[in-house]
């Protein structure tokens, strides 16, 4: 089969398909014919040779993908021909991933799908939907009618959280550093978009004096205290991302958390995204009640380099999706 397999750090332009052995199903793993996959920042990091120690060469990139089962292990909960999404579970890092015609995926990293949507739409969803849903559901316990602040709303997870938050009945406020991204964020469901200059709490309180009910932090620890200041006295903040590079707080003390406010984090797996929820989102997208934030669709493994380069450029809004045509 053809795959994007790394043997050393390379540039985006050097990402070219090579011929490798087609995987075979084994206990705990099925073979998925990959039909589409999203391109992620973590894959760019891996391509540059900057991943954690669990990443070793040679490695096929790709932490997520969609397709259908072509070989099922004897212990598989899935059937041959069944549509699935796959994500995390070591894919593209500890084990070979989805940048390939076929992928050997752990059962624990797969979710069954029921949809007739095109692969380019389905392929955009797995990772950003899992992360946004886990953050809003497990992290924030978001309820209809609540006000939700998404700090870092023009990221792919942020954009998906805007659309999902609206679908769940929340009133969504989101931030971005770029005026050029505001219109797209409003189209996805943000009722108000704030230009983030590093201090957005005052902007929030200007139109919501008490603050927001809940906040999703995607910018990082550098913005965390300001995000806390934007939520209500009994509000909740979920830390999920570090777009600004801040993942830790030096000399952290629990007393940094404002009294009465709740702080949690989210870093989950495929098991946190029920198949029923995935199908609900797919049905909402099919009915045009939810917009899947796609920046650009590419066709064929030979376009992976272009997709990664465009992702790195920061000039696009939404997910970059590669479709493998028959």
Image: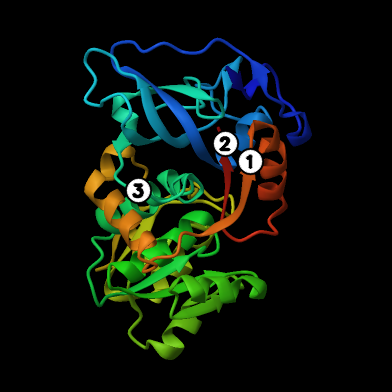
The quarter of the image holding the C terminus is top right
Q: Residue at x 64, y 35 (%)?
A: 300
Q: Of discs 2 and 1, which sits in the foreground?
A: 2
Q: Earlier in the sequence, mark 3 or mark 2?
A: 3
Q: Residue at x 46, y 36 (%)?
A: 65
Q: Earlier in the sequence, mark 3 or mark 1?
A: 3
* 6 vs 11: above or below: above
Q: Residue at x 48, y 48 (%)?
A: 124
Pick the front one: 69 or 224: 69
* 261 vs 77: above or below: below
Question: Are circles 3 and 2 on residues that touch, CB within 8 Å?
Answer: no
User: In 3D space, how far apart are the residues under numbered discs 2 and 1 (Cα atoms)?
Assistant: 7 Å
- Quickly name the residue at label 2: 325
User: In 3D space, how far apart are the residues under numbered discs 3 and 1 (Cα atoms)?
Assistant: 33 Å
Q: Residue at x 26, y 25 (%)?
A: 79
Pick the front one: 274 or 174: 274
* 54 vs 231: above or below: above
- Quickly name the residue at label 1: 299
Pick the front one: 140 or 27: 27
Residue 58 percent coordinates (x, y): 61, 14
Q: Secondary structure at mark 1?
A: strand
Q: Quadrant of residue 10?
A: top right
Q: Is residue 196 visible?
A: no
Q: Quadrant of residue 19?
A: top right
Question: Are circles 3 and 1 on residues that touch, CB within 8 Å?
Answer: no
Q: Of discs 3 and 1, which sits in the foreground?
A: 1
- Quickly name the residue at label 3: 266
Q: Is residue 100 visible?
A: yes
| Label 2 crowd (10 A; few <14 / some 14-19 / many >=20) | few
Q: Secondary structure at mark 2?
A: loop
Residue 193 percent coordinates (x, y): 51, 77
């Amino acid at each position: 089969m053809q795959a994007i397999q790394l043997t050393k750090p390379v540039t985006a332009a050097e990402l070219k398909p090579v011929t490798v052995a087609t995987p075979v199903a084994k206990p705990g793993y099925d073979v998925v014919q990959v039909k589409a996959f999203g391109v992620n920042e973590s894959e760019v990091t891996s391509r540059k040779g900057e991943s954690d120690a669990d990443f070793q060469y040679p490695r096929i990139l790709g932490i997520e993908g969609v397709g259908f089962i072509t070989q099922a292990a004897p212990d598989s909960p899935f059937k041959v021909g069944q549509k699935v999404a796959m994500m995390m579970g070591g894919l593209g890092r500890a084990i070979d991933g989805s940048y390939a015609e076929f992928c050997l995926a752990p059962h624990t990293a797969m979710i069954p799908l029921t949809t007739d949507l095109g692969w380019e739409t389905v392929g955009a969803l797995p990772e950003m939907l899992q992360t946004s849903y886990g953050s809003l559901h497990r992290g924030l316990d978001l309820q209809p009618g609540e006000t939700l602040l998404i700090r870092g709303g023009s990221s792919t997870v942020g954009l998906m959280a805007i659309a999902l938050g609206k679908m769940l009945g929340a009133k969504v406020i989101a931030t971005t550093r770029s005026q050029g991204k505001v219109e797209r964020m409003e189209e996805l469901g943000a009722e108000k978009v704030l230009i983030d200059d590093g201090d957005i709490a005052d902007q929030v309180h200007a139109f919501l004096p008490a603050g927001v009910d809940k906040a999703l932090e995607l910018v990082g620890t550098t913005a965390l205290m300001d995000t806390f200041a934007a939520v209500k006295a009994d509000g909740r903040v979920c830390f999920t991302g570090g777009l600004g590079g801040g993942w830790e707080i030096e000399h952290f003390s629990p007393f940094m958390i404002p009294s009465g406010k709740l702080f949690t984090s989210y870093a989950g797996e495929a098991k946190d995204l029920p198949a029923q929820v995935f199908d609900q989102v797919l049905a909402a997208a099919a009915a045009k009640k939810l917009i899947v934030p796609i920046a650009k669709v590419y066709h064929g493994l030979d376009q992976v380099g272009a997709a990664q380069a465009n992702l790195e450029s920061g000039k696009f809004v939404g997910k970059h999706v590669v479709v493998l045509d028959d």
